[in-house]
Image (spheres, helix red, strand yellow):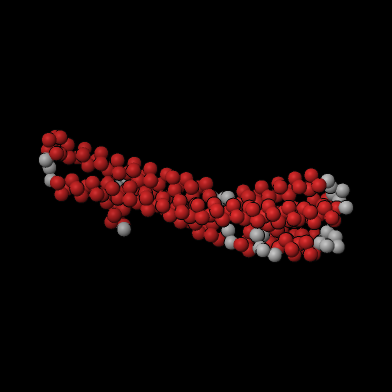
């Protein structure tokens, strides 16, 4: 692999950097988008249960906030109601929606970078191939003119072209997995957002019963 990278020339190094960054982003998103860290299935039920007789204490709210991203949103509802027991339903919803937008931003973190790598890697590979082809034909022409380039050593010319095409191949090798993982994480985030939206709507209705 290292010999291929050396043969492909300097244009392949940006692709190597993109591949390392993409791999790091994939591992980071796999770690951050686990269900327990985002939206534990029974968290809303537990939050409703502990607050049936009133708003729980500050320690319980703090534990809820540290539990997950959904916990942060639900804790915002408790804090808003603690700060102003007469808060209107519209203000309560606005507070939870603001917390939900912050949670959505955390869920979508680095996805734009992964999508950019998936889009740019084939273009970087094509650029490397074009630069390689220019260098190949430039060296052939410089050694004896265009006529000599056309009638030079076909094996040498074919080897040079194959080396230049390494950039395109490597660009696709980087881009295809990046695109697949981006689509996977994008679908996963959309699913989490829907789950959090439904949980928040249910939680708002519960908080309204405490507000009255």
Q: Nearer the viewer, residue 92 or 146?
A: 92
The spot of residue 39 in percent (x, y) is: 65, 60
Q: Residue at x 75, y 60 (%)?
A: 62
Q: Nearer the viewer, residue 18 or 179?
A: 179
Please indicate whether residue 1 sits to the left or right of residue 39 in the image: left
User: For residue 150, what is the image quadrant?
Assistant: top left
State how many labels appear.
Answer: 0
Please indicate whether residue 165 sits to the left or right of residue 20 in the image: left
Q: Residue at x 67, y 63 (%)?
A: 41
The spot of residue 90 in percent (x, y) is: 79, 44
Q: Quadrant of the N terminus?
A: bottom left
The answer to whether any part of residue 139 appears in the image is yes
The spot of residue 166 in percent (x, y) is: 30, 50
User: For residue 60, what is the image quadrant?
Assistant: bottom right
The answer to whether any part of residue 63 appears in the image is no
Does residue 127 sit above or below 211 in this rendering?
A: above
Q: Residue at x 81, y 55 (%)?
A: 207
The spot of residue 133 in percent (x, y) is: 25, 41
Please indicate whether residue 99 sits to the left or right of residue 57 in the image: left
Q: Nearer the viewer, residue 22 or 42?
A: 42
């Amino acid at each position: 692999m290292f010999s291929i990278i050396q043969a492909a020339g300097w244009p392949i190094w940006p692709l190597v950097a993109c591949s390392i960054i993409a791999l790091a982003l994939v591992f980071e998103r796999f770690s951050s988008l686990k269900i327990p860290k985002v939206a534990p299935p029974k968290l809303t039920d537990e939050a409703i249960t502990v607050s049936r007789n009133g708003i729980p204490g500050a320690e319980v709210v703090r534990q809820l906030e540290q539990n997950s991203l959904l916990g942060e949103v639900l804790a915002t509802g408790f804090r808003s109601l603690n700060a102003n027991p007469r808060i209107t339903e519209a203000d309560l919803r606005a507070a939870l929606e603001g917390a939900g937008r912050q949670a959505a931003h955390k869920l979508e973190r680095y996805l734009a970078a992964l999508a950019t790598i998936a889009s740019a890697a084939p273009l970087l590979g094509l650029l490397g191939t074009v630069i390689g082809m220019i260098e190949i034909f430039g060296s052939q022409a410089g050694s004896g003119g265009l006529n000599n380039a056309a009638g030079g050593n076909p094996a040498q010319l074919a080897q040079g072209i194959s080396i230049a095409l390494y950039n395109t191949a490597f660009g696709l090798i980087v881009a295809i997995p990046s695109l697949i993982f981006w689509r996977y994480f994008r679908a996963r985030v959309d699913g989490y957002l829907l789950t959090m939206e439904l949980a928040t709507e249910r939680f708002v209705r519960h908080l309204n019963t405490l507000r009255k």
